[in-house]
Each structure stands twice: as structure tokens, then as C-alpha cells.
Image (cartoon, rainbow, N blue to C red):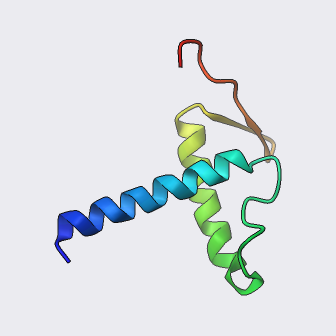
């Protein structure tokens, strides 16, 4: 596999997962993940949360997460 193709597929996969996390932030983001994978899923979820907080799409206050309203015009 070409490196650029592999990277593009990886990025597409990560963005798809991120969209799922956002959609299910109020519920269990990885309810479809087998329990033995939860520690890995938790690390992945935390990475998504840090990214979304950095993009001002999610707020984190005292460990509580909340989805921010989209900016007007978005």
C-alpha cells in the first residue's frame, strides 16, 4: 500500500470515528465496542475529546463534558 493512501485512509477512519463520538457524546460513545477493548477505546475517546476541546467544539468543566453550539454561519 502506498504511504499516502494509507495515511488518507487512516485520516478518513479517524474523522469518521470523531463524527461518531460527537454524535454520541451525551450517551456512551463506544457502546458498540466489546468490553475487552474499552481501555483502548477510552484512550481514543480522550484523544478525540482533547481535540474537540482544542477546537472549541466541546467544553470540559470539572470533568463534565458538554457539546458547544455551532458557531453562527457554520
Q: Residue furthest top?
A: 72
Q: How many badges with numbers are in the image?
A: 0
67 vs 73, left or right, is: right
Name the residue rendered at 72%, 66% in the picture: 30
**Horizontal side of residue 37 vs 15, given as left or right:** right
* Whole-percent x, y for residue 51 in the image: 53, 46
Tell me where residue 4 sits by quadrant.
bottom left
Look at the picture and state if 22 lies above or below 45.
Answer: above
Which residue reaches farthest bottom?
36
Which percent across, then down, holds residue 61?
Answer: 78, 38
Where residue 45 sits: x, y (%)?
A: 64, 60
Vertical order, 42 against 29 (above or below): below
Name the residue: 83% across, 53% down: 27
Query: Which residue appears at 53% of the width and 13% of the height?
Result: 73
Q: Is residue 28 above or below residue 62?
A: below
On-image quarter of the N terminus: bottom left
Residue under the point 60% across and 39% down: 53
Foreground pick, 30 / 42: 30
Amino acid at each position: 500500500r502506498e504511504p499516502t493512501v494509507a495515511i488518507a485512509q487512516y485520516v478518513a477512519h479517524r474523522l469518521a470515528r470523531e463524527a461518531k463520538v460527537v454524535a454520541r457524546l451525551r450517551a456512551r460513545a463506544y457502546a458498540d465496542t466489546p468490553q475487552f477493548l474499552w481501555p483502548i477505546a477510552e484512550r481514543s475517546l480522550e484523544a478525540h475529546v482533547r481535540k474537540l476541546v482544542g477546537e472549541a467544539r466541546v467544553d470540559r468543566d470539572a470533568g463534565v463534558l458538554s457539546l458547544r453550539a455551532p458557531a453562527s454561519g457554520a
